[in-house]
Amino acid sequence: MTDAANKLLRVACVGAGYFSQFQYEAWHRLEVDLAAICNKTEANAQKIADSYGIEQVFTDFEQMLDSVKPDLVDIITPPSTHVAYIQLAAARGIPVICQKPFTPSLKEAEYATKLMEDAGTMLVIHENFRFQPWYSEIKRVLEAGTLGDLYQVAFRLRPGDGQGPEAYLARQPYFQEMERFLVHETAIHLIDVFRYLFGEMRSVTAALRRLNPAIKGEDTGVMLFEFENGAAGLFDGNRLADHPAKNRRLTMGEMLLEGSKASLRLDGDGRLFLRPHGEDQECEIDYEWQNRNFGGDCVFALQRHVIEHLQDGAPVMNRARDYLTNIRIEEAAYSSNELGKRVTL
């Protein structure tokens, strides 16, 4: 192997908000050169730099790109900033991981996607739920045919963090100001998981509403999906209600898959239970995973996945072009809610 092949990838990041702690911690564990951090507030960036031994701190994104010349940029900022940062990376041919929500609108997402494609470089969306270990295990069970023909799947989102005037302020206060919230910010995760596990969708029917007057967007609702394979999917979300779990943000809720041979249940502690059709007892599936950081260390798994692609040419998931489908499903859900009817995709 050549020295070039052995060279660590230089990673530069922008953003120092609440969720960025998980990205920086994961980069620190991966075999990369975490070379620089950029943030409008230098003090916040410096604090992260001190924690993870990042040598260079910037307040200007373009200056960071030109000075550091990174092999990969991780954009960990609010959606309104993404297009501008992607433009600057595209102009320099630098691959990008972009935090979700991807952009504020489908039109902007399509524009950013084309920019990077025209530049001939990678744009991956940081959609990490599909990298949570329980979904990897569910994928394995489905591919093994253990459930038989899949009839339907239901996910009940119940994080219990949306009650009262202080909802979300401690972690992500901008949640309160989002005009579109439950679907755009949260359910998009499960839309992606559903596609990852069960394939493409034919239609969506949605009914959304707001319960907490302290926020602008919807915080509860249901969406019914029809998959191309004939299965049905239900997303039932309520950010005010909770579910039994040691950490209610681990899985954010509970899932049930029902097939011709068996049913599979995910609980709030990341445990999976299989019950053969016609039987009353379910047995727990033993699988390996680490209860570390967010969502079973899914941030680390996603970032490692991207590094493997850049270093070895391994296939990569979550490319922006594919992620546009998630956003189109999101748009269809909002249209369905407004029109009061099923929307074909």
Image (cartoon, rainbow, N blue to C red):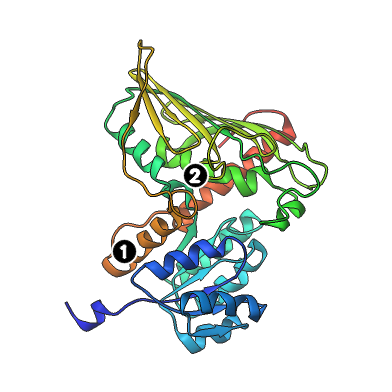
Which percent across, then down, holds residue 298? Answer: 43, 53
Q: Residue furthest left?
A: 1
Q: Quadrant of residue 48?
A: bottom right
* Residue at (67% x, 64% y) in the render: 80
* Residue at (68% x, 40% y) in the render: 334
Which percent across, then down, holds residue 184? Answer: 64, 48
Q: Give the total number of marks visible in the rendering.
A: 2
- The kind of residue tagged 2 is Asp
- The kind of residue tagged 1 is Glu
Can you say which quadrant of the picture contains the N terminus?
A: bottom left
The residue lying toward the viewer, choosing from 169 and 148, is 169
Q: Which residue is mark 2?
A: 192
Q: Secondary structure at mark 1?
A: helix
Q: Which residue is mark 1?
A: 308
Q: Is residue 113 visible?
A: no
**Are the residues tagged 2 and 1 within 8 Å (C-beta)?**
no
Can you say which quadrant of the picture contains the C terminus?
A: top right
* Residue at (52% x, 79% y) in the render: 50
Which percent across, then down, holds residue 333? Answer: 64, 38
Which percent across, then down, holds residue 319? Answer: 44, 57
Q: Residue furthest right?
A: 213
**Local crowd size for mark 2, using a 10 Å CA cut-off: few (<14), some (14–19), many (≥20):** many
Q: Secondary structure at mark 2?
A: helix
Question: In the rendered structure, which disc, 2 or 1, sits on the residue that comes first in sequence?
Answer: 2
* Residue at (47% x, 52% y) in the render: 128
**Local crowd size for mark 1, using a 10 Å CA cut-off: few (<14), some (14–19), many (≥20):** some
Q: Is residue 337 visible?
A: yes
